[in-house]
C-alpha cells in the first residue's frame, strides 16, 4: 500500500499533514532494505531539510543532497546531478499520470534517452558498448530514477540489472555481442523471469520445464509477476532441465526472445502499486529455444540465479532510498509554507520530520 501512496503523493507539491504522517511511518518499513545497500556500498547522503531548498525546473522544490561528505568522486557527483536533472524534467512531471493510467506511453522513447546517456549499460564493459562503470554508479542512478517515479525506477532496475547485468556476468561472447547492443541503446527492453504462481520465495521449486530436442529446447509452463513482461524484447528465464534432480539442481538459464515460437504474455496486471511498471504472466507452450540460447552451464542455473540475486537486491535497494528522498522533497516545502499560529510549522518541534530524516541519512 505504501508504494501507491508514495507514487500518487510524492509527485504532487501540495500534500496534507496526514500524508506526511504516513510517509514517516513508511520510512521505518523501508529502513532495512535501504540500509542493506548502504552497508554493502557505503555511501550516505546528508539532506539539509530546513536549511536549503533549490528550485527545480519541473517540480518547484526539492531537498538538496550534500555529496561533499558522501565519499562520491567527482564523476559520481556529476552522474547524480545529470540524472537528477534529466529525470526531474522528463519523468517526474508524468509520474502521477503514469500511475493513474497504469501505462507509460512514452516508455520506448524514454528508454532510448536513457540509452543515449549511457544509463542502460552502466556495468557493461566498454567493448560491448557499455559504460564500464561500477555498481555504486548503478545504485546512484537507481535512486534518482526512482526518486522521479517509483514505477519506472522498478522497470529500469529490471532492465539494466536483472537482464543486462546477468548477460554481462554469465553470457557467452556470442550472446553478449548479439543481445547487449540493443539493450544498451534502449532499442530493446529487457526482463528476468524466475517467479511462478506457486514458486515465489522458494524459487528453486519452479515448475517451468525445458526438454532438449537436439538443436533446441521445448519450454512448457508459466512465469508470473514478471516486471517488464508485457514489453520485453529479451528475457532471462530459468527452467528445470533435469526433473529427476532435487529442487536446487537441474535448473538452466535461457535467453528468450519475444518472437520465439510458443512464447506469449498474458494481459498486464492492474496492480495496486508500481502502476506503469508493466507486470504480466509469461506463457510457454512448446516454446522453441535454440541450444545456443542456453546461458551458463547446463543444470547449473541455480548458481546463475543466486549469484545474480545478490547484486539485484543491492541495486534495487536504491529504489526505496530514492522514494524516501522523494518524500522529503514533498514534505519539506510543506513544512516551510504551511503556517500555524503565525509561522511555518517547520519552526516548531520537528520530532516527526526528524524520525523521517534520520533513517535516510543513516543509510
Image: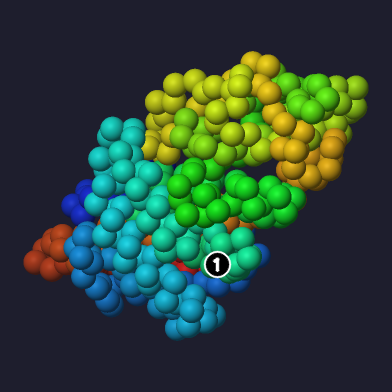
Q: Is residue 110 above or below residue 352?
A: above
- Nearer to us in this view, 176 or 250: 176
Q: Position of residue 55 (x, y in %)?
A: 21, 70
SS type, badge 1: loop
Q: Residue at the far left: name it.
A: 342
Tally of numbered tags: 1
Q: Quadrant of the N terminus?
A: top left
- Dot 1, how many residues are within 10 Å of its Cα: few (below 14), some (14-19), or many (20+)? some
Q: Position of residue 73 (x, y in %)?
A: 52, 81
Q: Residue at the far top: name it.
A: 285
- Nearer to us in this view, 47 or 151: 151
- Nearer to us in this view, 109 or 329: 109
Q: Residue at x 83, y 43 (%)?
A: 297
* Residue 310 can be seen, yes or no: no
Q: Is residue 348 above or below residue 256?
A: below
Q: Is residue 104 above or below residue 346?
A: above
Q: Position of residue 238 (x, y in %)?
A: 71, 34
Q: Position of residue 234 (x, y in %)?
A: 57, 39
* Residue 118 can be seen, yes or no: yes
Q: Residue at x 22, y 59 (%)?
A: 59
Residue ID for mark 1: 131
Q: Residue at x 90, y 22 (%)?
A: 244
Which quarter of the figure has residue 323?
Answer: bottom left
Colouring of the image? rainbow
Q: Residue at x 52, y 37 (%)?
A: 233
Q: Is residue 165 left or right of residue 149?
A: right
- Nearer to us in this view, 133 or 359: 133
Q: Is residue 29 above or below residue 281?
A: below
Q: Is residue 7 left or right of residue 189?
A: left
Q: Is residue 242 left or right of residue 142?
A: right
Amino acid at each position: 500500500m505504501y508504494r501507491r501512496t508514495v507514487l500518487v503523493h510524492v509527485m504532487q507539491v501540495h500534500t496534507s499533514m496526514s500524508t506526511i504522517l504516513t510517509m514517516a511511518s513508511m520510512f521505518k518499513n523501508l529502513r532495512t532494505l535501504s540500509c542493506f545497500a548502504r552497508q554493502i556500498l557505503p555511501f550516505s547522503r546528508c539532506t539539509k531539510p530546513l536549511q536549503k531548498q533549490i528550485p527545480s525546473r519541473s517540480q518547484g522544490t526539492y531537498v538538496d543532497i550534500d555529496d561533499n561528505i558522501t565519499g562520491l568522486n567527482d564523476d559520481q557527483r556529476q552522474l547524480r546531478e545529470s540524472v537528477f536533472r534529466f529525470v526531474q524534467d522528463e519523468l517526474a512531471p508524468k509520474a502521477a499520470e503514469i500511475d493513474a493510467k497504469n501505462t507509460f506511453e512514452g516508455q520506448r522513447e524514454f528508454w532510448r534517452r536513457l540509452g543515449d546517456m549511457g544509463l542502460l549499460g552502466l556495468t557493461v564493459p566498454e567493448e560491448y558498448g557499455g559504460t564500464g562503470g561500477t555498481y555504486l554508479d548503478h545504485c546512484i542512478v537507481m535512486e534518482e530514477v526512482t526518486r522521479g517515479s517509483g514505477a519506472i525506477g522498478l522497470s529500469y532496475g529490471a532492465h539494466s540489472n536483472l537482464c543486462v547485468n546477468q548477460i554481462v556476468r554469465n553470457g557467452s561472447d556470442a550472446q553478449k555481442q548479439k543481445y547487449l547492443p540493443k539493450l544498451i541503446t534502449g532499442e530493446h527492453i529487457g526482463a528476468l523471469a524466475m517467479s511462478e504462481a506457486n514458486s515465489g520465495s522458494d524459487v528453486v521449486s519452479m515448475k517451468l520445464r525445458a526438454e532438449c530436442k537436439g538443436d533446441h529446447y521445448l519450454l512448457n509452463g508459466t512465469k508470473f509477476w514478471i516486471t517488464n513482461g508485457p514489453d520485453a524484447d529479451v528475457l532471462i528465464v530459468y527452467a528445470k532441465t533435469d526433473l529427476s534432480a532435487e529442487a536446487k539442481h537441474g535448473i538452466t538459464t535461457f535467453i528468450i526472445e519475444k518472437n520465439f515460437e510458443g512464447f506469449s504474455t498474458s494481459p498486464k496486471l492492474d496492480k495496486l502499486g508500481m502502476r506503469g511498471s508493466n507486470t504480466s504472466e509469461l506463457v510457454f507452450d512448446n516454446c522453441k529455444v535454440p541450444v545456443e540460447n542456453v546461458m551458463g552451464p547446463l543444470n547449473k542455473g541455480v548458481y546463475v540465479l543466486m549469484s545474480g540475486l545478490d547484486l539485484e537486491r543491492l541495486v534495487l535497494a536504491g529504489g526505496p532510498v530514492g522514494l524516501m528522498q522523494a518524500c522529503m522533497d514533498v514534505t519539506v516545502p510543506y513544512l516551510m509554507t504551511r503556517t500555524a499560529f503565525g509561522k511555518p510549522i517547520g519552526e516548531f518541534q520537528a520530532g516527526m520530520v526528524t524520525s523521517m530524516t534520520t533513517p535516510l541519512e543513516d543509510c
